[in-house]
Image (cartoon, coloured by chain):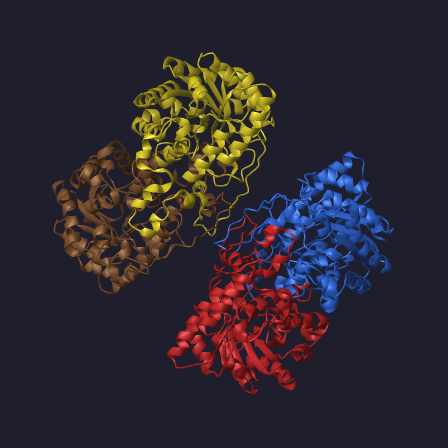
Chain colours: A yellow, B brown, C blue, D red
Amino acid sequence: MNILERLESGLVIGDGGFVFSLEKRGYVKAGPWTPEATVEHPEAVTQLHREFLRAGSDVMQTFTFYASEDKLQNRGNDAAKTFGVKDINEAACKLARTVANEGNGLVAGGVCQTPTYLSGLGKAKVQEEFHKQTEVFKANSVDFMIAEYFEHVEEIEWAIEVLKTMNVPVAANMCINSEGDLHGIDAGKCAVRMANAGADIIGVNCHFDPFTSIKTIETMKTALDNNGLRPFLMCQPLGYLTPDAEKQGFIDLPEFPFSLEPRVCTRWEMQKFARQAWELGVRYIGGCCGTEPYHIRAIAEELSEEHGRMPLGSEKHSPWGKDLTMHTKPWVRKRANREYWENLTPATGRPESPGCSCPENWGVTAGSEELLQDF
Amino acid sequence: MNILERLESGLVIGDGGFVFSLEKRGYVKAGPWTPEATVEHPEAVTQLHREFLRAGSDVMQTFTFYASEDKLQNRGNDAAKTFGVKDINEAACKLARTVANEGNGLVAGGVCQTPTYLSGLGKAKVQEEFHKQTEVFKANSVDFMIAEYFEHVEEIEWAIEVLKTMNVPVAANMCINSEGDLHGIDAGKCAVRMANAGADIIGVNCHFDPFTSIKTIETMKTALDNNGLRPFLMCQPLGYLTPDAEKQGFIDLPEFPFSLEPRVCTRWEMQKFARQAWELGVRYIGGCCGTEPYHIRAIAEELSEEHGRMPLGSEKHSPWGKDLTMHTKPWVRKRANREYWENLTPATGRPESPGCSCPENWGVTAGSEELLQDF
Amino acid sequence: MNILERLESGLVIGDGGFVFSLEKRGYVKAGPWTPEATVEHPEAVTQLHREFLRAGSDVMQTFTFYASEDKLQNRGNDAAKTFGVKDINEAACKLARTVANEGNGLVAGGVCQTPTYLSGLGKAKVQEEFHKQTEVFKANSVDFMIAEYFEHVEEIEWAIEVLKTMNVPVAANMCINSEGDLHGIDAGKCAVRMANAGADIIGVNCHFDPFTSIKTIETMKTALDNNGLRPFLMCQPLGYLTPDAEKQGFIDLPEFPFSLEPRVCTRWEMQKFARQAWELGVRYIGGCCGTEPYHIRAIAEELSEEHGRMPLGSEKHSPWGKDLTMHTKPWVRKRANREYWENLTPATGRPESPGCSCPENWGVTAGSEELLQDF
Amino acid sequence: MNILERLESGLVIGDGGFVFSLEKRGYVKAGPWTPEATVEHPEAVTQLHREFLRAGSDVMQTFTFYASEDKLQNRGNDAAKTFGVKDINEAACKLARTVANEGNGLVAGGVCQTPTYLSGLGKAKVQEEFHKQTEVFKANSVDFMIAEYFEHVEEIEWAIEVLKTMNVPVAANMCINSEGDLHGIDAGKCAVRMANAGADIIGVNCHFDPFTSIKTIETMKTALDNNGLRPFLMCQPLGYLTPDAEKQGFIDLPEFPFSLEPRVCTRWEMQKFARQAWELGVRYIGGCCGTEPYHIRAIAEELSEEHGRMPLGSEKHSPWGKDLTMHTKPWVRKRANREYWENLTPATGRPESPGCSCPENWGVTAGSEELLQDF
């Protein structure tokens, strides 16, 4: 079944975040966040794909985040020169396909926002960047495409236009909250414009936590309904809690990107999110930055009935901590139940840390001189 | 150079925590925490070894935590029956050696506390469990041995006695804070007894956070000094902050083991720990549960001068966030400096979570009926 | 000048909260919260009036909160029987007038929500309760009337109708946030209805913190503007921080009323509120429960220019901590400046306390059987 | 019965903090903290005495804190010149006696640390300051004397020597934690030296929270026991929580003195303290800065059996919130029980505030040039 047929018949589980996971494993550089690891360290990328497959993911997303040529050579990055946009994207396709074939997985190619857009160089230049990638995706026969991590609805419309020429299903995700895109267009309107541009699957990824993202999808759904539009809904939020993030999302939080640890979601928070997303009508549920394999497994366990199966990885994880009955200490064995974990508000172990931060609010975006990039 | 020569000439960096990392990756079951993944999923274990090597570890510790036969069959665990103590330990040795050979690494075999001791079955039975493992370690020519995660000094003395028969250097680590072991023997006395039992390297691992563990080592050092003993000092603490944990450590915290996320150390906290440990005279510095590859890299970067090299993994990580100069957003680029990260107290993103928990204090230990295990 | 003339020509500063202050001083019972102290302990009530006068208050509000007869005899309260509605209200008038005469103060009589309304007994019965009080206020020639602490716009309309018959200016305050009253009527509509009922001064008091209340007034102001209505605006919020309170306000927080201490506003937070309120166009600024004399002084100091004078009590308080230059310790002397206090985020001294609570949400209100009172 | 007979026969309840309470009421200036209000605003001082009497206090402590002549003229303070040390102390005696006579109260005169000592001017000069006060106390026949708020055991010894010449019982309290005084003399030794100097009642006041102070008394008690000394024990701690304060106490916390609000103890915390103090053998229990009348009432209610009576003020306060049964809202009525309040961990309403601060650690004290005072 292709992605649309799968969505038609029920739940599709996405994968989690590659750049943050691989940064912690030592293969991605925070700052540029580019995916040259597909060429440099294919075994590490493969292993992470495999962990997500095992956790219940139906889709192997090619590790091509920020793999447009302009980004690969932006601000001193030499990945474009050393490896080239073609090789990086092609390696990503092959790794994803290899692991997808180990299960019953689909491969999704992906494109995201470009420095070219941020620098205000116009539609033709931006689409040219996408074209360099889509050629590789076509040559490698990905099963469908995801346009994700877009902050401006205009840019994602341009992306969708390019992706539609590939004749595969297209998913479109913006990294916004309900307030909308960075040019002030509200989330409902963004959803309608993405649908009108031809996206088959619509939603959000990254920048905000699971519960904020649920609210954004609600806003989108209402607007889509009001316009008689019925695309599939998709949600791949952060694996971090960001109640204090404002419009620009977690990059504005002072903790981004090196002190986000206290914000990491527990598996129980992820289960709660999965349930809420499903009940809202979201049919494609996964994660973005900060979402590790066990977070995806939590989604797959919470929705195992809807998904029709338990994930392979649950051979090492009984729902709601039941395996703690095998712990040597009796007081830990007492925690082997749903009530315990569902009701626990975890302490942070950080008496000198506050609950919320004051996000930076630069309020500049595409078109601002300060955002001109340096290719 | 063997481990003692390396310690003599400077710093040795250990690896991080396997059971918690692999639990999150989907290969270890929380509760029993046993390492049958060495047989079931060798590629996942190998990959984690490789990440630690890349992060700067000098030692590949065999993934043989809780791999004593009594633990592999405790409380319904069928790992002993399915795979057997010999195969699990042997696979662990081979995986560690393979990766050690990819760098200039040493292989350390490891044993830890046994259910047999907790059940009060006596010295002969306990040592028998260790013997089953040491036979495999000898056959596989590990470079040295680590006895770790012992809560009772009596049991680690029995372990050291067995390990000394292998004629390799022996490190001994208890999982205690300065209050001492679970029979009420203070940390200083524990250190002296471990040294007198023949351990060449002495310290603590697991159960407490880096800063609590520093204080324990201080207590140990004072007692060792007062007794004219000069073993090398070693510290492999949790990668979690546990200021509220009492004598039994983090397993007593209500968040153990499934809601510890907000307590994960940042890389900057890990650097601070590394510096403090080095200044105290600790020469073997690594981590235990919760310590991911990037935490080990943080140790290796902080002490790169003392270590004589930057870790391989730093090709993707400039010290103190310098790579953020390559970020697309100007306000994030402003964070590319030491002062910013060193002074940031991270918010937890959890306004409904307190800073500290109230640990459970069962106050029972080896010898108590409640702790009889069920093999 | 009467109250309207004073408001016309500038700022009027109200007083703070009597029931919570006097509860802590030992003269009011939490639960019934009735003001029989006017008869029982007139010296204590007088002293508190005097402290507010000294802090800068222009208005002495009679301590007649919950002094309707039905409340004085509700749920086992014997204040009605022992002292009687007439004596309690009359004593309150005399005490307020005595202290008002010590400065240039006005006396405001006050009525608030009634158990009769909560029990659904209808307009006639409710207004009868107000009439018993207004007779006393008329006989004692109060300068104007305040209807405050109403949760339902219908009930405050009935109150305004009664107060208008007194031929003095009428202020009307509801204890709501921008969501509106407990029957679901939004805050803007409530403001318009109060103005249309004849209130000269309109706003909110109690139930929410200063910053939440500012937002409510904003909502009210917009609606009033849109309806061409221009009453004076008034704001007398809690002296507690309640970011987590929902529609029913702080009584829904688990800490109400005996563990609110960590939420007490600092004087600096109060100054911030005063400035924001003034800038929004609020001309009558004071406080409710939790607002102590020093909070009122903080308002009077922040707006001393607008008010035309510094409060008497500032003989013991230089703005922004300048008197700390007289402290014996040099490091405390360094705190004698605005920058220090304005930028300090105070620690709570409570590592086991979270930042927010989960409020109760009973969702029942006037008309519900559970709210029938027991006179 | 005199104070020693009362202590012999059971519990004595002290009063709370005057300078912080009266600062908030508008009669004391933070910084100098001197008590000229006894002359300027006797009605305000009297009212506070009365509230403490009503709350259960057995002792009216003269409001003579920092009323030594050198302090009254220190750093620009003109209280010495305007009113004079004699008048301020005398007025304090009269106010305390008036209120003591309204109940069965005792009057205690008080002296505390002097700028003369901080400036290193020697024993004769320091004792001269005490003499100026004790003359007034003798002339006004106080029932006993309290030397309190001393940071250096040497200075309190000098004070005790002076007080002993008055031929009344002497209590001696230092403002230290178990680490000891600011010259590094541990708390146990301080206690022994105070007892040897002739103090009949020994303990701590101010600077630290109730629970820290309990630990200090424990340390003192052990040392006294070991030296065969059996003075009565006394404890009058802060009404603020200060788990993060180090040796110099709460003045080192960044929040001192104007942002301590979130640290105010609840009545339940005060009851817990009272019970712990009593069980440790403390027989004189009261409070210092931050302790309001309702905190003293909480002590008196918790120990009403030991004290032989309920405080007068409990006519407005049933134990453990029982009066909430008279609240209009059913969900608040459900809180009318001990279990609810004893188990509630109050939220701070401050998601941007941490639990702990980093105290300043100047590490200078008497004798340091930086501490020379400016009379």
Q: Quadrant of residue C38?
A: bottom right
In front of the other: A363 or A161:
A161
Q: Is residue C373 left or right of residue B194?
A: right
Q: Residue at x 74, y 62 (%)?
A: C80
Rendered location of residue B286, percent (x, y): 30, 46
In front of the other: C116 or A296:
C116
Query: In the figure, D323 relative to B135: above or below?
Result: below
In front of the other: D196 or B185:
B185
Asked if residue B355 shows in the view, the reply is yes
Asked if residue D208 shows in the view, the reply is no
Query: In the figure, C105 relative to D76: above or below?
Result: above
Q: Quadrant of residue D142?
A: bottom right
In front of the other: A282 or D140:
A282
Q: Is residue D302 left or right of residue D54?
A: left
Q: Residue at x 63, y 63 (%)?
A: C24
Rendered location of residue B127, percent (x, y): 15, 52
How many numbered discs sit on the rendered protein? Answer: 0
Q: Quadrant of the N terminus of chain B?
A: top left
Rendered location of residue D36, percent (x, y): 68, 72
Rendered location of residue C370, percent (x, y): 63, 48
Give the residue furthest to the right. C167
